[in-house]
Amino acid sequence: MSETLIEKFIDKDSIKALETLTESETDTAAASAVQQLAGIFSAEETFKKILSMDSEAETKLVFSFNKNLVLLIQKTWVEKSDEEMKAQILYQLEEFCAQLNSKSYGQAYPQFFSIVDNVVYLMFGNQARAKDFPEYALRIDPEFGIFWWYVKSLPRDAQWSSDRTRNALLLGIYFLANY
C-alpha cells in the first residue's frame, strides 16, 4: 500500500509511530508508539490501562476478541470446501487465546497472523489474496483498511521482547474485539 494512500486516512504521526514500533531499539519508545497507534482505533484510554499491565483490562480484551471472532467466523457464509478451514481457525483461535492468557506472547505472535489472514480470507474470499486488497479494504471500509495496514506492516518474524510483542498483539486484537 502506498504511503500516500494511507495518509488520506491517518496522520503522519501515526505512520511514524508504526515505524517506531517496528524498528525502535527500546521498548519504551515502542510502548509510546503503540499508545499513539491506539488512537487510530479509538482505543487511547483502553490502551493506557493495558500498557500499565492492567491484567483485568487485558483479560477482558482477550475475552471480547475471542467472542467476537468466534461469532464472525461462525456467521461468515463460506463454500462447502471452506468449512474445514472455519473449524481449523476456531481451533487456532482457542489455542491463541490460551497463549495470551498464559502470557506466552512470543508463541502467540505467529498464530495471530495465521488467524487474521484466514479470517480475512473467509470474509473476502480470493480478493483477500489479491495484490490490491489493501487499497480495496481502505476504500470499502476505512477502519478495516487501517487495521489491515497495521497488520501487514508488522514483521512476521519479529524477535521482540515479550512486552513489545504483547503490546503489538493486543493492539491488533483490540480492533477485532470491537469490529
Image (spheres, rainbow, N blue to C red):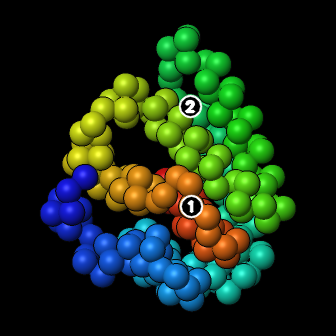
Disc 1 residue type (three-letter): Ala
On the question of residue 84 being in view, the answer is yes
- Circle 2 sits on which residue? 75
Residue at image position (40%, 72%) is 18
Nearer to me, 179 or 48:
48
Q: CA distance from mark 1 to mark 2?
A: 32 Å
Element type at mark 1: loop
Residue at image position (71%, 62%) is 105
Which residue reaches farthest right?
102
| In the image: residue 19, left or right of residue 3 | right
Nearer to me, 161 or 166:
161
Disc 2 residue type (three-letter): Lys
Which residue reaches farthest top?
80
- Decide: few, some or many residues near mark 1? Use Cα within 10 Å; few <14, some 14-19, many ≥20: some
Q: Is residue 170 above or below residue 35?
A: above
Q: Is residue 89 above or below residue 4?
A: above
Residue at image position (56%, 67%) is 168
On the question of residue 39 being in view, the answer is no
- Circle 1 sits on which residue? 158
Position of residue 151 measured from the top left corner of the image (x, y, whole percent): 45, 55
Position of residue 90 measured from the top left corner of the image (x, y, whole percent): 69, 35
Residue at image position (65%, 34%) is 89
Q: Which of the two discs, 1 and 2, sits closer to the camera? A: 1
Q: Quadrant of residue 103?
A: bottom right
| In the image: residue 13, left or right of residue 95 | left
Q: Quadrant of residue 73?
A: top right
Q: Is residue 4 above or below residue 161?
A: above
- CB within 8 Å, label 1 to label 2: no
Element type at mark 2: helix
